[in-house]
Structures are given as structure tokens and as C-alpha cells.
Image (cartoon, helix red, strand yellow):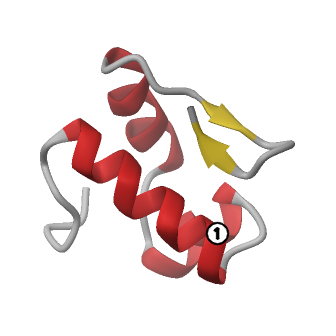
């Protein structure tokens, strides 16, 4: 995972939700642009209790 993102899962979720809200219309677009592994990212956040909701375009 990119070093420019927080390692703390709560902070990571917050940063990603801000990016999703402000600049990306989907998680795929964010992952493609930032060169992130979607499976790794969603798996890590799932372990912390957060899942991506495509209808809201955010982690919850």
C-alpha cells in the first residue's frame, strides 16, 4: 500500500472517504489513479470493520 496514506485504519478510512467525496466517482477510479491494490485496501479496512458502499461511494 502506498506510503502516502495513513497506516491507522480509522485515519485511512477518513482520508479515503474525503478523496472519494471530493475527487473520485468510484473506488476503482481512486485505486487506478493512486495505484493502490483494491483487494489489499478493502481487506485491510474490512478487518477494521469498514466496508465500501458503492451506492454511497464511501467506506462505512
In this rendering, is residue 60 above or below 56? above
Q: Residues within 10 Å of mark 1 (few under 14, many from 20)?
A: some
- Return the x and y of residue 24 as percentages of the image width and height: 68, 75
- Return the x and y of residue 58 as percentages of the image width and height: 63, 48
Picture quarter with the N terminus:
bottom left
- Return the x and y of residue 13 as percentages of the image width and height: 38, 47
> Circle 1 sits on which residue?
21
Residue furthest to the right in view is: 55
What residue do we see at 48% from left, 35% from top? Answer: 42
Front position in the image: 2 or 24: 24
In this rendering, is residue 34 above or below 27? below
Does 3 sit left or right of 34 as displayed? left
Does 7 sit left or right of 5 as displayed? left
Q: In which quarter of the image is residue 36?
A: bottom left
What residue do we see at 56% from left, 32% from top? Answer: 60
What residue do we see at 31% from left, 21% from top? Answer: 48
In this rendering, is residue 22 above or below 27? below
Amino acid at each position: 500500500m502506498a506510503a502516502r496514506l495513513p497506516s491507522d485504519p480509522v485515519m485511512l478510512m477518513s482520508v479515503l472517504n474525503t478523496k472519494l467525496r471530493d475527487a473520485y466517482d468510484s473506488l476503482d477510479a481512486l485505486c487506478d489513479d493512486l495505484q493502490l491494490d483494491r483487494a489489499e485496501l478493502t481487506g485491510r479496512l474490512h478487518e477494521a470493520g469498514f466496508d465500501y458502499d458503492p451506492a454511497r461511494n464511501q467506506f462505512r
